[in-house]
Amino acid sequence: AQSVTQLDSHVSVSEGTPVLLRCNYSSSYSPSLFWYVQHPNKGLQLLLKYTSAATLVKGINGFEAEFKKSETSFHLTKPSAHMSDAAEYFCVVSELWGTYKYIFGTGTRLKVLA
Amino acid sequence: DVKVTQSSRYLVKRTGEKVFLECVQDMDHENMFWYRQDPGLGLRLIYFSYDVKMKEKGDIPEGYSVSREKKERFSLILESASTNQTSMYLCASSFLIPSPQETQYFGPGTRLLVL
């Protein structure tokens, strides 16, 4: 079975500094990986997804993630944090079960300090 | 834009009540999903449906049932609500394309409190 591990439950950064949210996956074959963001009291919004076309994936709002097979990682980064980035972030792997279903990580809550 | 709507943002129910959570999508998606979200646990799949009147159990189906009479609507039913079902419930939908890269689109969630 596939799984994802988000290594940090909480991350705090200062506004204008880089963001790094870490995700490791476990998969017996080439995975499909996603990052979603959830702002307070809102649903989940897709930030980006890895489709095997390129290992560096660019998403919305300046976020990007790099797929590293040798490290089984898919870390999310952003060069400069904004206050509006404060939210919870979920790393997701897709698994075939009837149809393709998502396996979610436990989430990382990002706090951005002024 | 894909729109997934949920009938209520907040609900307060009593133990033992029957509870209906409704979800509607407007993109003609075949797949629909119900998740519950709890702090520190991420999202866990309760049930999903890949066609009208079709349903499959997810990871945590106990205490829940679902109904899909129309393609655009997927209902989650708590037959007899219990306090351990207090949670945030999220609905999602996607196309039935046999691709692991298929994106799911989420509703805003229903926060349910069972007293």
Image (spheres, rainbow, N blue to C red):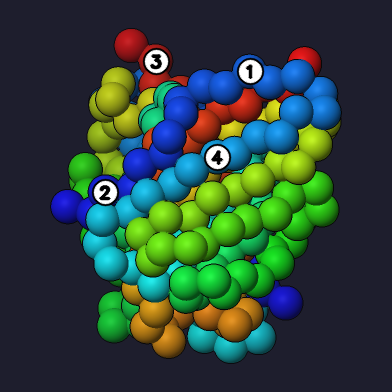
From where the camera sits, is residue B6 visible?
Answer: yes
The image quarter containing residue B25 is: bottom left
Residue position marked by numbered label 2 in the rendering: B3
Q: In the image, what residue type sits under mark 1?
A: Val
Q: Nearer the viewer, mark 1 or mark 2?
A: 1
Query: Same chain, marks 1 and 2?
Result: yes
From where the camera sits, is residue A67 visible?
Answer: no
Residue position marked by numbered label 3 in the rendering: A113
Instruction: Tell me residue B18's x, y (percent).
Output: 71, 34
Q: In the image, what residue type sits under mark 2?
A: Lys
Q: Nearer the viewer, mark 1 or mark 3?
A: 1
Q: Is residue A51 above or below residue B80?
A: below
Q: Secondary structure at mark 1?
A: strand
Which mark sits nearer the N-terminus, 4 or 1?
Answer: 1
Which mark sits nearer the N-terminus, 4 or 2?
Answer: 2
The image quarter containing residue A93 is: bottom right
Q: Nearer the viewer, residue A97 or A9?
A: A97
Of the numbered discs in the image, which one, if any, rests on residue A58? none
* Total number of numbered discs in the rendering: 4
Q: Is residue B109 above or below residue B83?
A: below
Query: Same chain, marks 3 and 2?
Result: no
Q: Secondary structure at mark 4?
A: strand
Instruction: Tell me residue A114's x, y (percent).
Output: 33, 11
Residue at image x 58%, y 58%?
Answer: B67
In the rendered structure, the residue with mark 2 lies on which chain? B
